[in-house]
Image (tube, rainbow, N blue to C red):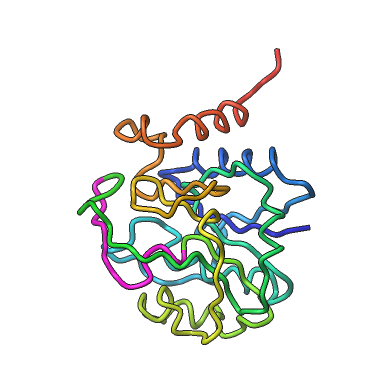
Amino acid sequence: MITICIGYDYKESVAYHALCQSIMDNASGPVRFVPINLQNLPMFERERDDKQSTDFSFSRFLTPYLCDYQGIALFMDCDIVCVGDVYEILKEVDGSAVQVVKHHYTPRTAKKFLGNIQSVYPKKNWSSVMLFDCSQCKVLTPEYVNWASGMLLHQFMWTESVGSLEPKWNYLVGEDQPECSPVLIHYTLGGPYFTEYQDCEYSSQWFSAFQRAVNCAQ
């Protein structure tokens, strides 16, 4: 069974549920979902600052801790839809402590969803999809995640073992991306559930997952 930790923010709760639906629809085996929801994480005591666009900006790094530092676990932001078999990512496990899509780009906009400032920094969006070998990430204790700077965490200064994933595992909608057939489509500027982004690239895939998530047979 693959464990998938997903960032949860009440302002985008619909995104969390649509993502879970899209993963289940395409997975070739069972999946275990763990919402990274601050309401359920009493060990996370870090105060939110103005630069955080979501509740899980830092709590995402608790993924190995929540998995008891065992096995392989996948973290992803909630503003994503899955259009392929998430189990295929396991074929890319290379023994690194963590693997990410190593984007090399500068955001094209100054702001993103809900008027949030679009911060620019090295390794932008690397941490939005992370494949952890949890046993190699024991430095990511609640205490460390509570005090470590954004630079230490998001630029992976906590490890020297950062492997690569193929671009299809974190395709950034609205940004310059290499050509690929995406599996994880990331609406990093704003999901189709926000009015101003409802016609963005790959919006139909998100709405399809959403409709399946709210389906109720009569």
Q: Please state, as top left, top right, bottom left or bottom right, where the N terminus lies in the image.
A: bottom right
Q: Is residue 171 above or below residue 50?
A: above
Asked whether 150 or 201 is in front, the reply is 201
- Percent across and percent down for residue 112 are 28, 49
Q: Residue at x 55, y 56 (%)?
A: 169
Query: In the drawing, does residue 110 fall left or right of residue 153?
Result: left
Determine which quarter of the picture holds residue 64.
Answer: bottom right
Query: In the drawing, does residue 107 fall left or right of residue 201?
Result: left
Q: Main secondary structure of the magenta part?
A: loop
Determine which quarter of the picture holds residue 18.
Answer: top right
- Percent across and percent down for residue 159 are 52, 85
Q: Please state, as top left, top right, bottom left or bottom right, where the C terminus lies in the image.
A: top right
Q: Is residue 197 above or below residue 142?
A: above
Q: Residue at x 41, y 64 (%)?
A: 103
Q: Residue furthest front?
A: 179
- Percent across and percent down for residue 105 are 32, 62
Range drawn in magenta: 115-127
- Percent across and percent down for residue 62 are 56, 70
Asked whether 89 or 69 is in front, the reply is 89
Query: In the drawing, does residue 196 fall left or right of residue 180?
Result: left
Q: Residue at x 34, y 45 (%)?
A: 174
